[in-house]
Amino acid sequence: MNHTAVLARLAVELRSRSTARVVFESGVFLGIGLLILVGNAMTLFIVYKNFHLRTVTNFFIVSLAFSDIGMAVLAMPMCFTVLVGGHWPFGDAACQYNGFVAVSMAVASVQFLACTSVNRYFRVVKPNKYRKYFTMKSTALYIALVWVCAAVSTIPYLLSGNRMVFHPGKLVCCLKIEVTWYTALISSLCIGIPTSVTLYCYLRVFQAVHKHNKQFAQSRGSNNNLSVEEIKITRTLFVVMLVYMTCWTPILIIDLIDTGRGYWSMKREVYTFYSYLAVVSSATNPIIYGLMNPQFKKEYLKIMQWELCRRNPSSVTAISTVYASHSRSRQENVNLGIQSVDTAKL
């Protein structure tokens, strides 16, 4: 299969889109990008302004937010330009940069999800060893190692004389389809192993939570050392992982099919959907925190209240009522001692 001819065909399809399709595809992509920036920036701001949120677990959340923002700021503007203009207007050097950023940020995201799962494993399953392995200093080291791993992930590919190529369907510069050895290497080391670790850790966590619920029912919680708050945090991070895997599993399947066939065999629309899934995964994390994590939800409401008050003081009443109702509800739940109900939701 002539790979150049395949890319040329996809390029023609990209240029020949109708105006309506250009507006639709570009608008959706821009909206996702803005959601990534605003949502993850709010996450960083919340952790920065609230000292009690500067925990080991939240440092991994912050690192994941930085990788999502990195994708939005460093790679997505070029993709948006391609969607609007219908071609790659930048040079070869920019293409190598674009491919490097896209691979590095994706690898970093997978690694940070694996780190949060290991963190939850020790916090829930091995709580006696948690403080030994997850101090502030060791956590900073883990985060630094992840960024180094992400940064060097494309080095073997580039040092072997290969170049990134612009893919008109995926809208980014990517690895050559014929370099199967590197695809297998990065898929196993940077995606397969971290994903397996993540799934194993959450499986063990759920087993521990189930055991906790049984002990609570028998002893009314007198001997439990697993707090409701920790279970809620674990549940939130599990949903983050689940949504991420939902977005990235089709991407991996498409890449595996193409690698097995030895050429890019899908339609342009499939590859464009591929790219939308990749960026959607970066936009969903702040939404999940806001819906499921009580600490972040409270801070998001504060920011919304402040912004509405600044723009329209009369509209702040509704937000204040929601926030007050939420606070009263939480207090009533604590007073009634319904921790067992909360844990059963996981």
Image (cartoon, rainbow, N blue to C red):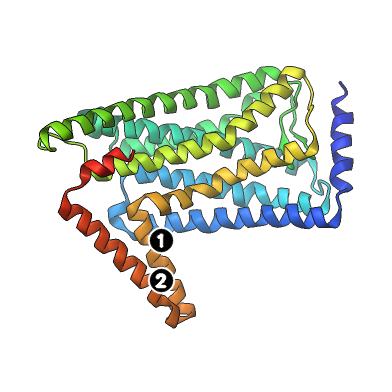
Q: How many marks?
A: 2
The numbered mark, 1 or 2, whose residue comes first in the sequence reads 1
Residue 89 image point, x, y percent = 82, 49
Give how far across and how far down residue 91 sits, in percent. 80, 44
Circles 1 and 2, Cβ within 8 Å, touching? The answer is no
Residue at image point 65% right, 46% down = 75
Three-letter amino acid code of the residue under disc 1: Tyr
Tell me if residue 141 comes above or below residue 20 in the rendering.
above
> What residue lies at 74% left-to-right and 52% top-to-bottom?
25
Disc 2 target residue:
305
User: In the rendered image, which residue does mark 1 sit on?
Assistant: 300
Percent of width and height locating residue 74 = 63, 49
At horizontal 42% and vertical 45% (from top left) the residue drawn is 61
Q: Residue furthest bottom?
A: 314
Q: Is residue 262 above or below residue 249?
A: above
- The quarter of the displayed image where residue 47 is located: bottom left
Q: Is residue 108 visible?
A: no
Q: Secondary structure at mark 2?
A: helix
- The residue type indicated by label 2 comes to Gln
